Image (tube, helix red, strand yellow):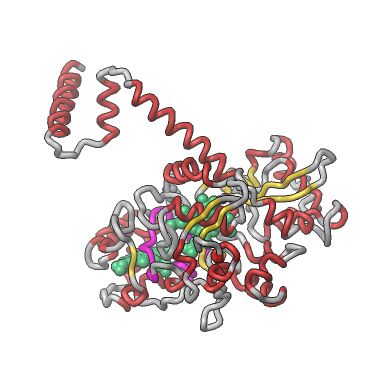
Amino acid sequence: MRNKKILASTVSVLAGVALLGGLGWITAEKADAQAQAARKPLTENDRQVRAQAQRMIEEGMRIFRFDTFGSEAFWGDALQLHQAIAGEKNGGVGGGVSPKTALSVGLKVDTEALPAELVAQIKAGKVDLDDPATTLALLKLNAVVGVTGKFDQAGRIQSMGIQCAFCHSNVDDSVAPGIGKRLDGWANRDLNVGAIVSLAPNLKPFTDLLGVDVATLKKVLASWGPGRYDAELDKDGKALRPDGKQAGTLIPPAFGLAGVNLSTWTGFGSMPYWNAYVAVTQMHGTGTFFDKRFADKDQYPVAAKSGAAKSASAGNTRGASDLTTSKLAALHFYQLAIPAPKPPEGSFDKTAAARGKDLFNTKAQCATCHVPPLYTEPGENLHSPTELGVDSFQADRSPTHKYRTAPLAGLWTHQKGGFYHDGRFATLKDVLEHYDGHFKLGLSDQEKAELTEYLKSL
Ligand code: HEC
Ligand code: HEC
């Protein structure tokens, strides 16, 4: 006992010396543990910082999950999507959207929002999942991940808005497929955004902006498929690739991004930059978004033509009231706090993964770009299409004209839909075949298999 204490204090003295000496090998956690061991009370400043961090995380979580940024003015009031969900029998239009249909287009149900007996009834198969009225009941309970219904006092749905969680959360399927506890930050690769938007009774806001008819718009919306969305269509109007293939990108995860410099597949900007972009220009919340780069008539003809860009400061969107800007700080903070989830025990071969790790860092040269433990470059984490050996279509839709080195932690959670920005590589083996050919790495089949196991372990 005493020996241990002496040892511990010697270690902490040495650590203190190292810290003073600027050797930097002591971690914040160790320093923290030592501070507690020495029973030093936190200073007032330390306490304030911790309290602020806690507040920001709680507030950010609420925003990520439940804040619509006023987007009901678009999805409900303008597109009338809530009417299609309700169906004629419930005061809307058409056949309505049953829970079965909602689940089939990738919407998720959060069981934590449901009373325990309802969860038991769902498990026992006693809830009618074919009736749109059940969907409305779930919306009333705020149990549809990323979608909020607005109801009047008589319980009739009046409008609806969407949240970040719509695309960037999943559930753990603990009750049934698509029904379980929330997993924030997970890319929803089942979500068919195009099919959902297509249901809207009024698509005029889209057809007017893009200058196309409803049939053309629906063709484009149908082209994305599950797990994809096109966040640049309303800027450049590029509905399809020149080869006729769909132009959407995969929904990326929104976890494990602390320390990652540029956001999005093509590195548009920082995380708060992109959060503002999405909330204001894609979710159609009310807020302020500013980027003069969208005034470029050649690259962004649709944005340059739209009302916002015609104003004195082109690329500037200002909502009548701003329901977004005040939320960006906490939202950013929360996202930075979401860790990349660890793969489940038994989901990869540990021995092969250990060999794959060596290959990743040496022969296969992956770590030159995917620098562990961020798995992207500290600094400007962008590469030209030619450097990567892929076409420039999506890169050229970004002001960077490049692709961002994708951070790989938690890769195992988003294998559905394929890899790279548009899912062009169906499997990790296909990704490795590409690198092997392009960089002439000379990897054997076994080495590719080992690298695959390593990628599954991140
Ligand atoms: C309709 C689906 C959808 C919604 C809603 C949505 N996103 Fe995204 N998000 C995407 C897609 C698709 C991309 C990739 C865009 C690209 O690369 O061009 C993306 C990219 C991102 C990224 C970049 C991730 C990375 O690896 O760099 C972050 C961060 C992000 N979204 C956060 C948010 C936040 C915060 C919200 C809510 C304000 C939100 N998203 C709402 C679909 C969505
Ligand atoms: C020259 C830099 C560079 C090198 C070297 C490199 N990568 Fe990448 N990697 C990228 C970029 C950039 C992307 C994003 C491509 C895109 O979005 O289309 C990417 C994407 C990926 C993806 C897809 C991630 C996703 O979410 O879809 C995987 C997996 C991957 N790389 C693994 C590897 C492995 C394994 C190696 C080594 C054999 C490697 N990379 C070498 C830059 C690099």
Query: For residue 54, which quarter of the picture?
Result: top left
Is residue 373 left or right of 156 when viewed as pictured?
A: left
Q: Is residue 428 visible?
A: no
State the count of labels: 0
Residue range corresponding to the magenta coloring:
401-426
Q: Position of residue 39 (x, y in %)?
A: 28, 17
Query: For residue 454, which quarter of the picture?
Result: bottom left
Q: Residue at x 65, y 71 (%)?
A: 222
Picture layout, residue 240 above or below residue 94: below
Membership of 113 in magenta stretch: no
Q: Position of residue 223 (x, y in %)?
A: 61, 73
In front of the other: 8 or 194: 194
Determine the residue located farthest toward the bottom in the rendered image. 243
Query: For residue 419, which quarter of the picture?
Result: bottom left
- Name the image quarter holding the N terminus: top left
Q: Residue at x 51, y 71 (%)?
A: 300
